[in-house]
Image (spheres, rainbow, N blue to C red):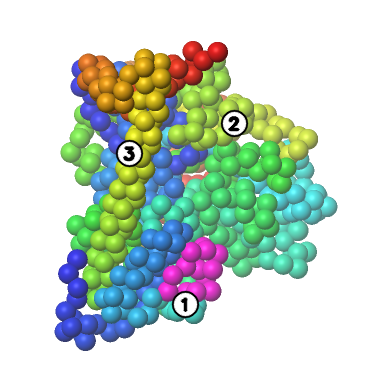
Amino acid sequence: MSHTIITAGFMPLTDSMLLVVAEQQGFAAAEGLSLRLMRETSWANIRDRVGVGHFDVAHMLAPMPVAANLGLSPLPVPFIAPMALGHGGNAVTVSLDLWSRMLAHGATDDLDPATTGLALAATVRASAKRLRFGVVHQDSSHNYELRYWLAASGVTPDRDVEIVVLPPPLLPDALASGAIDGYCVGEPWGGVAVRAGTARIVTTKSRIWRSSPDKVLGMRAAWAEANPDTLAALIRALHQAALWSSNPANLPEAARIMAQPQFLDQPADLIAGALTGHLAIGADASRQVERFYVPYAGAANFPWKSHAAWFYAQMVRWGQVQANPENLALAAASFRPDLYRAALAPLGVPVPQDDYKIDGLITEPTELATPAGPLLQFPDGFFDGARFDWSALL
Amino acid sequence: MPPLSQNALVNQPDLSILIIDDNRIRASIIEEGLREAGYSRVAVVIDIDAVARVVEQVAPDVVMIDLENPNRDRLEHFFSLSRALERPIAMFVDRSDTSSIEAAVAAGVSAYIVDGLRKERVKPILDMAISRFNAFSALKRELREARSELEDRKVIEQAKGILMRSRNISEAEAHALLRTTAMNQNKRMADIAQSLITAAGLLEP
């Protein structure tokens, strides 16, 4: 049987797992697909290679399709994201020097973004030198979550601290050499620095913005339009990969696969920690982080249009785009829950029926009614108690 | 890539061009190409940490970077903040010129230009970079092929020696034996030779 070949770009990060698992565990083949996985060295390359058609699809930063459609990227090519590749998955890591200063200002070692944020703010005020933080790209959830956490803790990004961009694999070395004081990045790159004995994880994305997407399946809108059946098959293959990846019994195998040189090229036990949420956060400390990285549960693959709207709101907040109804509409149209829903319809699995939600309403695990049965939703919203109501932007 | 006509050179204002490439050889090949084409203001940065300083110094109209460079995200961010490049930076020659963009990405180079610079002024520079990038890749491929050919030849010589000693046959006979075996098994002679060397190693006392 001849398989339809899909060329898929990815960056070496734990949450590229769904694409890798779909190919390696045969879920793509079961849908008549063969994934040609191409590891990339920068997010700009991922974006441009999808844009010019070198890649059909890619593991993409969740805000990237939104930014592209708002004219923030160099190619005038419309992008869409019909699926999220999980929730959570990244952490904020600081140098041991900064950690000791934060401890002196009341930081707690429970990864609570509220207390570590206040301790960081106090440290920033007392610091003679302006601290510098690394993120992986301007249009990344890391950038926006780091900024959200800093601002909510009383630190004004760009004024009080500097934020610079570095590719994920270079962040641990930059921290060790003192070029930066901290960073926000997807695993395993926080864990790599902790293991090297040069860093401390102080909080996680899963605590700053609960149940939120980090990466999406990104592609040209034109590719999706020209290949609707192939896209639906790909979404189903990734759905099966997500289900497989959410079974704890499969995680050792998942870690072994991802550890291989052509994927992450990092120790399997380090990757296993990121998958199970059992994180080493310092030389002598580890924590079990609830829902650190969620490949499937809680509708973690559903591309909420309200999440696209939140990324747009951050781009407005930090001066990247103008606030107007046209831009909001462009942002929301970047995420395509309709395509996700249609692809999974034959499987009869519960999928949210709304395209938008207000983030911060769910405080306890709650069952959402869908035609295919109840769907368990986990707490969402922000660590400072703020809600995000996209309709307030209208 | 035909050289620019004298006339074109006269009309070509002296643009400042910055090449960022951690491959020193490729960078110098492009630099040389640009100088040959009459661009005299060409700067090269190998060490990414020096970019900020060099941008301040040379105030480039065009910045070129190789796509393998993991620091591309950092540079994009830097350019978007930089005061040295006064206006926002656009990438590639012209957002509407997709064939040129494709050629650049395929060759592995991207260019950032000062917004407002006319397409005709930058196109020859990017074309030059693309052709030099492609030439460099071809050169690398040829080198790799030459190297593996040399390896093959060594392996075959070694296998022939083993056959000549163990079977007490001439070099021509050893060569013919290897070739026939390779043909019968539908394999490369070098592969048969390698298997023979491995097997001989295992059988050694």
Q: Chain of mark 1?
A: B
* Side (left or right) of A144 relative to B97: right
Position of residue A234 measured from the top left corner of the image (x, y, whole percent): 30, 29
Which amino acid type corresponds to the residue marked 3 in the rendered image? Glu
* Other-residue count near label 1 (Cα within 10 Å), few / some / many at <14 / 14–19 / ≥20: some
Residue drawn at (23%, 70%) of the image = B123
Badge 2 element = loop
Badge 3 element = helix
Residue receiving disc 3: B149
Residue A62 visible within the image? no
Residue receiving disc 1: B84
Badge 1 element = loop
In the rendered view, tell whether residue B195 sits above or below residue A69: above
Residue drawn at (44%, 70%) of the image = B44
Residues in magenta? B43-55
Q: Mark 1 or mark 3, which has the lower sequence index? A: 1
Q: Chain of mark 2?
A: A
In the rendered view, tell whether residue A37 sits above or below residue B48: above
